Image (tube, rainbow, N blue to C red):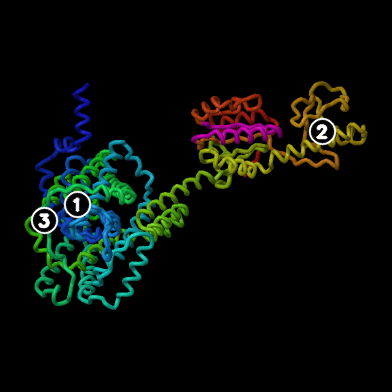
Amino acid sequence: CDSKRAKNAVLALLPITGWMRLYRVREWLLGDVLSGISTGLVAIMQGLAFSLLASLPPSYGLYTAFFPMLTYFFLGTSRHISVGSFPVLSLMVGAVVTRLVPDDGPPANITGFDGLTQDQQRVLVASSVTFLMGIFQLAMGVLQVGFIVVYLSDTLVSGFTTAAAVHIVVSQLKFVFGLDIPGISGPLSIIYTLEKIFVQITSTNICDLVMSIVIMVVVFIVKELNDRYRAKLPVPIPIEVIMTIIACGVSYGFNFKETYDVDVVGKMVSGYESPIAPSMEVFKESAVEAFPVAIVGFAVAFSVAKVYSIKHDYTIDGNQELIAFGVSNIFGASFRAFAASTALSRTAVQESSGGKTQIAGLISAMMAMIVTVALGFLLEPLPRSVLGALVIVNLKGMLMQFREIPYLWRKDKPECVVWVGTCLGAILLGLDLGLAVGLGVELLTVVFRTQFPRCSVLANIPGTDLYRDHKDYLHIFRPNGVKIFRIPSPIFFANIEFFRDKLVEAVGFNPLRVLSKRNKALRKIEKLLQKKDDDVTEKGLRDLFCQTTDESCMNKEEVDLPTDLKDLPFQMDWNAELPANISVPRVDLHSLILDFSAVSFLDISALKGLKTALKEFIHVDVDVYIASCDAHILEKLHSCMFFDDEILTSMFFPSLHDAMLHVLEKHKEDKSKGWVV
């Protein structure tokens, strides 16, 4: 037993031991190698480009394509995602970098910055934020809170990533136009950045602009061809790599840096530097930003991994993924890498080009290592505008998510509000605050849906035991004097009054008002009886009082009329003809059935409100029944002393049909009066 538990623990912590034993070398190895090469080329280009989003020298993007993958290879449960830089995370890290180390001002007062150049300060900030992000992810994985991503709905993530794409486009415009614009972070930073771009628009570097437009057009066209002929192409055409090589060659041959004042990548770091420790002061300054970065990074990676795990029929573990990404980011940050997750486009290349396992990911990491160690100098003449153009053109999928707005508005308006609220919040306030705004809007829509559910009056479909909303069917059976009311949500403190209002609206009368009118009528009748008005006694009250004790005449002067009538020796027939000066609302309802099939819980406040509502109907001679109540709710009703002399356990029925049969049996004389619409 102990050895089996130890084996399961090893398999859980090191998923590689599971799939590596099943590895089919002859069938899978060639596909993994080809996939790794293809993915590596894309990862190299994206690493260089996304490092600009993080406000870092391009060579550090290659670190992110290498180090995190080494640990994920052993710890990750997904066999297909490509671990590395992701534009949204890069931008979120870049916001912290530019806040602590701005372009046009002194850096933050951090002791660890002493003696460092601006680039080194920025690398320290980015790696420290990534280290803290990894700590958050690792802690959540150890504490088994992988379920936290369920609060990030697809709609919220779509709106958030669309806003991030807008931020990314704006941040790359300075490279496309060749302008010298400092990085700006914080609320409304996108507005201030656009303002600076338009102020300097006349200083545009035409060479940068033309190169960017040509590259965006060519890459866009080839990517469309890749999508259209995906089934016929063995691997997608690596157009980013091809255009990067051409741009490097043209820039070097025509000396763009000197001739046209083009900003190029410049000196690439050759090889790997020694590990560094994170800065505690940066931790304090960036803790608020690092947590949403950790959440977004995991949510994106987990959602992509889930898609491919379903497609290829294997399981992934959310908590183990948190541990894997936590360790990967901590390890990568120690070697100056910045935040790692996955990119859908890169993962799609890895899977579509034949990748079966993370051996493809390991080979792609080796490709990044080769470029870093031996070939980095070849990328030094590469114009930064080319990287900016590649970033923008790869955002097509994110930007096309704007098309979801009309669909969501037609199908589900609260979801549309979540999308628009998240997107606008993230665009105007920044990605970290925007995510908080999106979560707030999303929770408000949940409260709105449960606080104001769509209640309905049900009716029987003739010839069946089914009960549906009477508005949805032409032919239904509704016995006279019976109402079936359904509330499709939990009943709690926030919606109990709404429930009571809708119930009154459904039955067509307010039981409290009816009871009040009846009590007033009783007092009037008592006065009339005390005056011994023969006309009233003979005509007005002959049908009002129906003897239940015997047929003899009662001495009405001695009758005490209580407000609830339960001590009277006779039964009141309030639907009979009353004296002219006595007005009481007519109640044609004798039975009310409440459908609790969708009520998942009741809190104490709702329980008290429900008890009061039921007694109000009982006091006006309406029998109340509750059908399809959950067993746990029944237990709570018993434990909270819900039942008494008026509210009995016999009011509860296992199904609507059982309750209806009981009502029809009890009121046989009305059975023939039911009507079909």
State the image coordinates of residue 336 (x, y, percent, origin top left): 18, 52
Residue ID at (11%, 50%): 366
Q: Answer whether residue 602 is magenta in the image.
A: yes
State the image coordinates of residue 155 (x, y, percent, origin top left): 39, 52
Q: Answer whether residue 440 is magenta in the image.
A: no
Q: Nearer the viewer, mark 2 or mark 3?
A: 3
* Quarter that holds the N terminus: top left
Q: Report the span colored magenta.
A: 600-629
Comparing 472 with 265, the one in front is: 265
Name the N-terminal-most of marks 2 and 1: 1
Which class describes the residues within 10 Å of circle 2: few (<14), some (14-19), or many (20+)? Answer: some
Q: Is residue 202 left or right of residue 22?
A: right
Instruction: Measure the C-alpha gap from mark 2 to mark 1.
Output: 89 Å
Q: Considering the numbered disc 3 on the image, is that residue within a helix, a strand or a loop?
A: helix
Q: Considering the numbered disc 2 on the image, is that residue within a helix, a strand or a loop?
A: loop
Residue ID at (30%, 58%): 99
- The residue that disc 1 covers is 337
Which class describes the residues within 10 Å of circle 3: few (<14), some (14-19), or many (20+)? Answer: many
Q: Name the disc covering residue 544, or none.
A: 2
Which amino acid is tagged 2?
Leu
Name the N-terminal-most of marks 1 and 3: 1
> Residue 87, relative to residue 558: is it above or below?
below
Q: Name the disc covering residue 372, or none.
A: 3
Which amino acid is tagged 3?
Thr
